[in-house]
Image (spheres, helix red, strand yellow):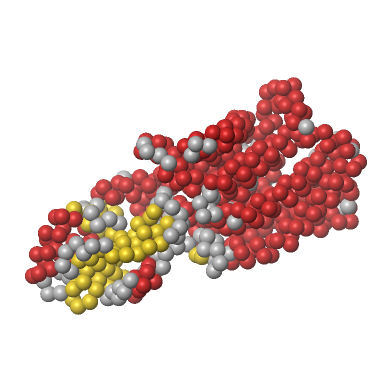
Amino acid sequence: MLSLIVWTLVFLVFLQFDWLAMSLSRRGEGGKIVLKEILVSLFRDKKESTFVTIMTFVGVSLLMGDGVLTPAISILSAVEGAVLIPGLENLSRTSIVIISSLIAIALFSIQSRGTEKVAGAFGPITCMWFAALFLVGVTSISEAPEILRALNPYWGINFLIENKLVGFFALGEIILCATGGEALYADMGHLGAKPIRQAWLGVFAVLILNYLGQGAFLLNHPETKNVLFEMVFFYAKDLYVPFLLLSIAATVIASQAMISGMFSMVYQGITTRIMPMFKVDYTSMERRSQIYIGSVNWAMLIAVIFIMVEFRESSRLASAYGLAVTGTMVITGIFMIWIFYLQKKPILSFIALFITIIDLVYLLSNFHKIPHGGYWSLILASLPFAVIILYTRGQKRLYRMMNFVQLEEFLIKFNRVYESTEKIQGMALFLLKSIQEIPFYITQTMFFHGIMYEDNIFVSIIKRDDPYGVTGFFKEDITKGLRVFEIQMGYMEMVDVEEILRENGIEERAVFYGLEDITTANPIWKMFHFIKRNTPPFINFYKIPSKKLHGVITKIGM
């Protein structure tokens, strides 16, 4: 079993994420959406892009479901160690759940302060935690050094061959040692690849020594149930309470890695327009990718507390845990194979294929968990998946329902109205996606309401396929009184539109933008309307002069 744990960490964390996946970042950003953008940029066929997009939606949703289970199982398992403290042997299950919930509330409540500030407090605790794991692991190994034979992969392979189906199902529990590996990749934007890789080298060695120490302790104490806590209690009884508190702090930090990874993923989803525009706060002056999304934070807290109350025990939660993790690992593996193949890197593609086959075996071994609580992984993943599908389909349908006017047809009417209408002095900006299709709100403002300025500028904000870089420039004037200003930006950029306008000499009197008032009897589009109505409009996502904004409402029946 220990041999399988060691080599699972080697293949699925060290090779898959620390080496292969993190080599495919863009400007330091990682995650499913970044992999998708890299892959789509290598395609020529739109059908392939559609398949990859759906796979990305599934992968992101599974990881978000995992983002709920990770804090729940981590905090619950740490608090359960309190039952070994003299006088607390009869600590009730309800009390453990309440304490765990309070810890989760405290963790999610400090997220708005930013990863940077939280990490400053967590750093020393992390060092103490791994030092403690190292010491107790080495101490235990010294009493049964023969456990070091577990480093030989022969024993893991032999276990699977001898135990056949039972050994296969055991993989569903062994994978729990590698959960959180995906967060290494998703957190790159928050922390940077170099410090993650440097930290992982030390962490990997400590984890291996501690797992081997737990195995050595089991050889001498086969009746043990809660191995880590009982091992510490045996070797350092007087230090057990500090260790327990340290373990709780460590699980909070492990949960922090997943939470910040969730923020990164949701932000990438917003910028690539697969998720609604949730309000985003930026928490660092040095690293612009350090963000806080309040709605995601509190939704995750509610879900974590619900899962704690539902399962009540970490051992029961372990029966549900692993399905989402292995599912998202398989998708990451498929993307890596494809990317390396298209980049003509056959050796890396072959290595990625080998690792993905291992991922797939672990995924299949977790299927038996579905009736034992594993269905909660699928339910939790289905919620963000439903939101993504509803939002992307709704946006496409809404776009089709909009009464756009082709540029040529618009210009004919504009020229006539511009010459015959009394014009307002100054400059007005009109926000739109593409100048080839003029939205109804612009024709409504200019032609129906007669609001015509001396200088009218169409402002188009375009997302590029690459993550960073911002340029703003005037295109050729399309007719008298009408100009086009285009802002091109990487999909991970946080743009100050007002600053770009001033740099290009634009001093507007008014900024007009369109709003949709959706009417529908269809329950699905009613949900889409609810999402649209309760998330900020796109203008809140960019820094646009707020005192000059004028929203023009267009009624649309879906």
Residue at the limit of the structure toward the right, as seen here: 143
Image spot of residue 253 (x, y percent) = 67, 56
- 339 on left or right of 187: left
- 282 on left or right of 455: right
- 273 on left or right of 194: left
Image spot of residue 521 (x, y percent) = 29, 47
Foreground residue, 93 or 502?
A: 502
Residue 17, placed above or below residue 164: below
Residue 61, placed above or below residue 119: above
Does any portion of residue 416 appear in the rendered image?
yes
Residue 17, placed above or below residue 503: above
Foreground residue, 86 or 322?
A: 322
Image spot of residue 336 (x, y percent) = 53, 39
Image spot of residue 197 (x, y percent) = 65, 51
Q: Which residue is at 15% across, 55% downward?
A: 408
Q: Which residue is at 9% across, 64% downward?
A: 416
All told, the count of numbered labels is 0
Find residue 189 and report its image quarter. Answer: bottom right
The N terminus is located in which quarter? top right
Does any portion of residue 368 appear in the rendered image?
no
Q: Which residue is at 61% across, 49% downward?
A: 184
- 250 on left or right of 357: right
Q: Which residue is at 33% across, 71% downward?
A: 504
